[in-house]
Amino acid sequence: MDKKSILGFVIVSLLFVGYSIYNSKQQLKYQEQLTAWQNYQDSLARANAPEVPADSLEYTAPEADSPEEVLQRKVAVVGETLAAASEGEEQIVTVENDVLKIDFSTRGGRVKDVTLKEYTKYAPRGERNEQVKLFDPESANFSMLFHLKRDNKFIPVNTMNYNFTAEPVRTLEDNTQSVVFRLPVSETSYLEYEYLVHNTQTPSSDYLVDFDVRMVNMAAELAGQSNFELGWSNTSYQNEKGFKNENMYTTLAYRLPGEASIEDLGMSEEAKSEEITTPINWVAFKQQFFSSVFIAPDNVASANLSFSTEKEGSGYIKDFSSKMIVPLMKDKTSYDFAFYFGPNRYSILKDVTVGDEGEEIHIERLIPLGWGIIGWINRWCVIPVFDFLRNYIGSFGIIILILAVLIRLVISPMTYKSYVSMAKMRIIKPQVDELNKKYPKQEDAMKRQQATMELYKKMGINPMGGCIPMLIQFPILIAMFRFFPASIELRDQPFLWADDLSSFDSIVNLPFSIPFYGDHVSLFALLMALSTFAYSYYNYQQTASSQPQMAGMKFMMVYLMPLMLLFWFNSYSSGLCYYYLLSNLFTIGQTQFIRRFVDDNKLHAAMQANAAKKMNGKKSRFQLRYEELMREAEAANRNKKK
C-alpha cells in the first residue's frame, strides 16, 4: 500500500472509532431518560390499578406504591410543580352561545364535547329531539407534546396527563367569552390556553372558536427543541339515517397553503393514513353534514393523518386522528390557532376567514360540489337560486320542483336543437338507405361514408347534432348529483312519504339485504328508474329508425341502465331521486311539446331548399380538402388490393 492509502485507512478508522464512542454515550443518555420515564409510567399504572377482593385466588394484586411514593417518583421525573398538576379530578367548564354548547375539560385543557344547538340527530318523523354532538366526549383528545430539560435530560410531557387550572370565564366587551386554562411547569413558567367563544349572531364567527397557546417563561424549559407536536383525535357519531351513505361523505380533509382546492384521504370504509411532509393550513374531521376543523393561520410544518371506520350499528362512523408538528420560533411565545365546529353549509363556510386581514382559507371546499364546470354550476347558479327560493317557499319538495322547471327551461334551446337534428336524420333515412344499397360491399365503405357525409352536408345536417346538446346537459346532471347529497338544507325536511330528503325514503323494510341494493325499497328511486325507462324507450323509438347503429344499444339503454340506476340510487338522497324523476318527466313532456310544433314536411322542404342553394354555390376549402383526402384514401385502398 502507498502512503496515501495508509493515511486514508487511518483517518477512516479514527472516524469510525470516534463515531462508535459518541453513539454509545448518546444511547446511554437516551436509555437513562427512557428508564426514568418508564418508571414514572409504571408508578402511574400501579397507582391506578383496580382493587381486587382479598379472597380472590385467580388474581394477585401487584404490590402498589403508596400515593406519597408515586408523587415522589413524579417529582423526580418532571419536577414538583408539574407533578402536582397530574393529581386531582378533571373539572368541566361549559360555555354557550346561540349556536354552540361547548364543554371544556381541565384535563389537557381541551374541548371535550361540542353540541350544535340548531340541529338534531336523525330519528323517525316526529322523534328528532336529540341535538347533534360532533364526537364522543370520551374519545376527545387534544394534546401538546414537548420535552422539558431537566438536569441535561429531556423529559417528554403530554398535556393530556395533567390538569390545567381554569380561570373564571370572562365576558369581553364584544360579548365574546374567554376561557383560560393554565398548566404550571415550574415556579416561574407555565403553559396557557385561551379559547374565545364568540356570540355575534354571525354564523361564520359564532361557529369559530379562537384558540391561543402561550408559553410564558418557557424558553429555558424548552431549550434545544425546534418544534412541538399537537395531537388531535376523536370518534364521530352517526347522525344521519343511513350508515353507508353518511360514511361515503365522511373523511379526513386538509388544505395546503395558497391552494383554492383541498385534499382528503378518500371516502372509504377501509382504514387510511397519510404522512404530509409539507406545511398544512387546516385539518378537518369531515362528516356528511358537519365538520370539526383545526385551523393554523401560520400553518403547521407537517402532519400524520389517519382514520378508521367503525362497524355499522355501533352508533359511530369514524375514528379520526392527526399529529401535527409546529415549529418553535425564536422569541415567539404565542401561537394562534382556531377551531371550526359547525355545519357544512356553503353560505357559512365561504365567509369563514382568519387573521386581522380576513384571509380566505377556502373551508367551503369541504362541501363536495364537484370540480371544474360542475362545481362552478353549483356555486354560481344552483346554490344562489336554491337560497333565493328558500326565502319565500317553505316546502323543499316545491323548491326542487321549481328548480327542475327552471333548469329545463334554461336548456330547452338545446333540447329543441337535439330534437330537430334527430328529425332531420329521420327524414333523410330513405336516402341513406339508397346509398347503402348503392355501395353494399365492404370495400366500398369509404365511398359509402363519403357519399353519406356529402348528403349530410348538402342537407345541412350535423351528424353530432343530436349528441352535442345531450353532452352539454351532462354537467348539469352531474352537478345535481353532487348538490343534493351534500346540501344540508334538505336535512330533516319531509316531503310526501319521505321523512328526510337528504337521505333515502323507505316504504318497505326487507328482512334481508340484497347485494348492491340494500334492505329497503326506496319509492322515489323506484319511480326515478321507471321514468328513466320510459324516457329511454321513448328516445330510442325516436332515434333507432334514423340511426341503425342504435339498435345494438337497445338492451343497454332501455333496460340495463334504468335497472343499474335503481340499484345505485336506492340508498341515495331521496331529494336527488325526486329531482331526476321530475327531470325525466319534464323532458318527455318538453319533447312532446316540441314535436307538436315541428312539421316534418316543412322541415324537409327547408332542407331541400338548403341543398339546392349549396349545389349552386362554391365548395368551401374545407370541403375540397376533405374530398381530396377521400380520393387519396380510395386510391391507396385500390393499390393495396393490387
Image: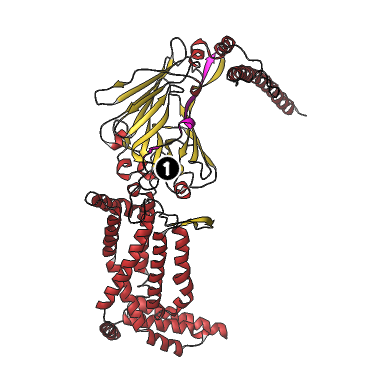
Task: Report the quarter where the N terminus lies.
Answer: top right
Q: Residue furthest left?
A: 392
Q: Is residue 232 visible?
A: no
Compare residues 56 and 223 and report the one nearer the observer. 56
Compare residues 375 and 302 and report the one nearer the observer. 375
Compare residues 3 and 621 and report the one nearer the observer. 621
Q: Which residues are magenta?
A: 129-150
Q: Does residue 148 belong to the magenta stretch? A: yes
Residue 346 at x, y = what percent?
32, 45
User: Compared to 431, does 283 lie above or below?
Assistant: above
Q: Does residue 402 belong to the magenta stretch? A: no
What amino acid type is highlighted by mark number 1?
Asn
Residue at the image point whose x is 31% and y is 50% from the top: 379
Q: Is residue 469 left or right of residue 83?
A: left
Asked which colour scheme the image uses, the reply is secondary structure
Q: Residue furthest right?
A: 1
Task: Report the quarter where the C terminus lies.
Answer: bottom right
**Disc 1 residue crowd, few under 14, some 14–19, many 20+, Cα 10 Å:** many
Q: Is residue 515 left or right of residue 177?
A: right
User: Compared to 255, does 621 lie above or below?
Assistant: below
Determine the image quadrant of residue 462: bottom left
Residue 37 at x, y = what percent?
59, 19
Determine the image quadrant of residue 526: bottom left
Q: Which type of secondary structure does the marked residue at label 1 adopt?
A: loop
- Tell me how many marks there are: 1
Q: Is residue 506 visible?
A: yes
User: Compared to 221, does 533 lie above or below?
Assistant: below
Residue 170 at x, y = what percent?
30, 20
Residue 250 at x, y = what percent?
45, 44
Kindly identify which residue carries mark 1. 239
Q: Residue furthest front?
A: 55
